Image (tube, helix red, strand yellow):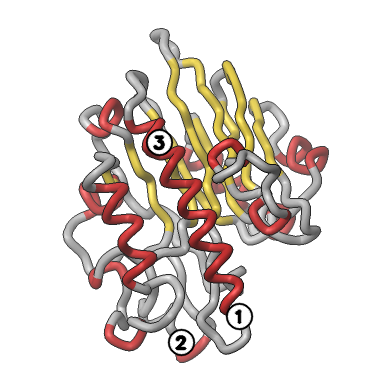
């Protein structure tokens, strides 16, 4: 059995100060997908010594950053989604450090494409409209790539912090967030398309019960973490070639409140 774990580490330095190495040792994942790494390449490799690592930092210092770490060899690595934009132009800096793919060599032969994704959060606050424009443009590129991976004959998993709560059961206060970024109908429609038209399976929901929750992010306000009034915005999505072979999916180590970027 192959175990794939995903975590928004909110800075890899801070995560290891909070004993992430002990968590890794206890969980023993074969593949580890990290988001908001926020560190230079040499430091990421230092923390993940002994792993095969594919890391994509953001061009904006202190922001984003994604990594795939594998105990198994990596056959190929692909970074970013520039090829899936309307003109194939280089990604704007705000899109960088958000998508990295690695083809993992499986013990019995064949490959698993593992994608670590950290999508835009966006904001509906006055004066922040441009952040939603950037988010939707990035989601269009994500959708184009997911359409390709969905049709692959080999298994693929896309996991990470997608910054969208898909359904009412994925957010504790869904009625109070209908006009807030992360739960807008336009955002949720993208996940609808991924899981229906393109055939991606939401393993967290399929193997974790009908909900509400389990949640993966909580606000700093109102003792949200203590009262488990959170959002489920972290996912593991499996393409059709993988979905039927997945046997378990659960939230093992919920992350405590952190600023959304």
Please rate how many residues cluster around mark 3, counting C-alpha atoms within 10 Å: few if below 14, some from 14 to 19, many from 20. many
Which residue matches tag 3?
157
Q: Do the residues under discs 2 and 1 have CB atoms within 8 angstroms? A: no
Which residue matches tag 1?
128
Residue closest to the eye, 85 or 146: 85
Residue closest to the eye, 192 or 175: 192
Please rate how many residues cluster around mark 1, counting C-alpha atoms within 10 Å: few if below 14, some from 14 to 19, many from 20. few
At a point 77% along the width and 61% down the height, the residue shown is 62
Label 2: which secondary element: helix
At a point 32% along the width and 73% down the height, the residue shown is 171
Chain-order first, disc 2 or disc 1: 1
Residue 111: percent from the left, percent from the top?
A: 44, 17
Residue 187: percent from the left, percent from the top?
A: 38, 65
Please rate how many residues cluster around mark 2, counting C-alpha atoms within 10 Å: few if below 14, some from 14 to 19, many from 20. few
Q: In which quadrant of the rendered image does the N terminus lie?
A: top left
Q: Which mark is residue 53?
A: none
Q: Do the residues under discs 3 and 2 have CB atoms within 8 angstroms? A: no
Give the spatial CA distance, label 2 vs label 1: 26 Å
Dot in front, 3 or 2 = 3
Residue 153 image-quadrant placement: top left
Which residue matches tag 2?
223
In screen coordinates, is 175 left or right of 87?
Answer: left
Q: In this view, does 17 lie above or below 183?
A: above
Label 1: which secondary element: loop
């Amino acid at each position: 059995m192959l175990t794939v774990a995903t975590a928004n580490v909110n800075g890899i330095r801070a995560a290891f100060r909070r004993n992430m190495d002990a968590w890794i040792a206890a969980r023993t994942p074969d593949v580890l997908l990290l988001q908001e790494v926020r560190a230079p390449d040499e430091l990421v490799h230092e923390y993940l010594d002994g792993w095969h690592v594919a890391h994509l930092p953001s061009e904006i210092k202190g922001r984003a950053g994604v990594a795939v770490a594998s105990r198994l060899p990596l056959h190929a690595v692909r970074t970013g989604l520039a090829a899936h934009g309307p003109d194939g132009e280089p990604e704007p800096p705000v899109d960088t450090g958000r998508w990295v793919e690695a083809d993992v060599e499986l013990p019995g032969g064949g490959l698993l494409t593992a994608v670590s994704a950290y999508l835009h959060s966006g904001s509906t606050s006055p004066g922040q409209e441009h952040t939603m424009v950037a988010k939707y443009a990035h989601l269009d590129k994500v959708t184009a790539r997911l359409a390709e991976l969905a049709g692959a004959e080999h298994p693929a998993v896309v996991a990470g912090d997608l910054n969208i709560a898909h359904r009412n059961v994925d957010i504790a206060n869904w009625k109070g967030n209908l006009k807030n970024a992360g739960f807008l109908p336009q955002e949720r429609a993208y996940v609808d398309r991924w899981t229906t038209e393109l055939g991606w399976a939401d393993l967290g929901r399929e193997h974790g019960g009908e909900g509400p929750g389990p949640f993966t992010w909580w606000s700093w306000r109102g003792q949200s973490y203590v009262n488990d009034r959170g959002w489920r915005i972290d996912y593991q999505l499996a393409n059709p070639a993988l979905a039927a072979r997945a046997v378990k999916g659960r939230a093992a180590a919920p992350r405590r409140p952190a600023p959304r970027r």
